[in-house]
Image (cartoon, rainbow, N blue to C red):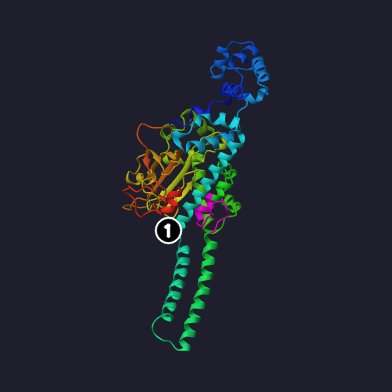
Amino acid sequence: MKLLGDSHLPSRRLTGARIRERRLDLGLRQSAVAQEVGISPSYLNLIEHNRRRIGGKLLRDLANVLRVDPGQLTDGADTDLLDRMRAAASALGEQVEVARAEEFAARFPGWSALVVEQSRRLSVLEDRVRVLTDRLAYDPQLAASLHEVISAVTAIRSSSSILVGPETLDADWQRRFHQNIHDDSLRLAKNSEALIAYLEAPELEPAGSFTPVEEVEAYLSARPDAFAALEAPDLNLKKFVSKSGLRGAAARALGRISAVYHGDAQVLPLETFVPACRALDYDPARLALKFGVDFAVVLRRLASLQTADGHPPMGLAICDASGTIAFQKPLPGFGLPHAGGACPLWPIFGAMARPSQPLCVDVALPGANASRFLCYAIAEPGPVSRFDAPPVLQSTMLVVPDPPPGDLPALPVGVTCRICPRDNCNSRREPAMTGVALQL
């Protein structure tokens, strides 16, 4: 599996490109610059096309002629900015020159920051659409609120139709119906305000969590130091959970998830797992074979690696046989609804039909961005408790963004039918909300 491409070359290899761009910005001829520093134009041409390394006195002389500090020719753009620019650019696939991200960032840092910020806002807005769609379809509290609003509207309509009907009502009955309309209008206003408050989220911020698992995911996402604590062999899980501040079902969910993570860390400690990952190019199959562990353990362990430590970004999703997402580590552009109703074409669900068989599938989301992911998935039975009991399956999927083009076309998938614009999908359960689908 190739995770790192030419866009991850060290910044020093792009020094020639920066020299060329600076010379062109100043309107200087290649031959004139070469003469100034005492080299041939052909040699300068090789430097500018990154075919000759440069440093020392020659670099200083070139910087002097180009009226720029030598550090601006050799130092690359901010690493975090570059990573986010590459992620934003790769969302458009081959339409964008991802390999030139560093060159663009070095020349136009302000515009680069704008591109990254716009990409972040789009990702946040798409997350909000997914969460709100999840609520519209499956949230019982929202269903009850909508039922109250519809009931109030129906009552007002019924009373109004009687008042405007052909029958003549005496003053007492008219007063009663007017009172009913007034009371139902107050109830409608109150329920509408509650519904709006429930749906509202701060501008450009993800909608709040409303399930225990989502609370755990939000806690772990905001506390990357928590993962370091879970690596410790002598970890006290009860103490770890109590320090989180989570209560009730969320605390119990954190306990279950932390126990699995801690167990994986003891089977594959970082000091041996990380060097193997880099040597084997983060290939789950080769890693599972090397360490002799279950494929799902390797998938979970890979997803736990932090990008801040130089590892490629990887997401994770775990579901049970009903298709309900029990835990996930989302990525920009990737996230499945927790309450069900996710696109059934994702490999995490396909693996359920072939227990214990690892899958590797290249998938593509719909829309203008056409985000692509390489997905590794496997469904495995849980522990056996008694004879003749039906197997309890759990499916695990590792998600790697922006894989290199494969030999076969990517499998078209979506997030959920309600926001998927594909109109020729045999697995569609319900039509999309057209306005939302078009925006995506």
Return the x and y of residue 317 as percentages of the image width and height: 45, 46
Above or below, comparing residue 67 to residue 162 in the picture: above
Q: Quadrant of the N terminus?
A: top left
Dot 1 alpha-carbon crowd within 10 angstroms: few under 14, some 14 to 19, many 20 or more: some
Q: From the viewer's perspective, is 51 left or right of 407? A: right
| Residue 331 placement (x, y as % from top left) | 49, 43
| Placement of 73 over or under 178, stated as above or below | above
Whether residue 327 is situated above or below residue 60 in the rendered picture: below
Note whether residue 52 is visible: no
| Residue 437 position (above or below residue 407) | below
Q: Secondary structure at mark 1?
A: helix
Q: Where in the figure is residue 66, as x and y percent of width and height?
A: 65, 21
| Magenta stretch bounds | 200-217
Q: Horizontal and vertical percent for residue 194? A: 53, 66
Image side of residue 235 versus residue 126, left or right: right
Q: Which residue is mark 1?
A: 137
Q: Say which of 427 and 277 sits in front.
A: 427
Does the magenta segment cover residue 181?
A: no
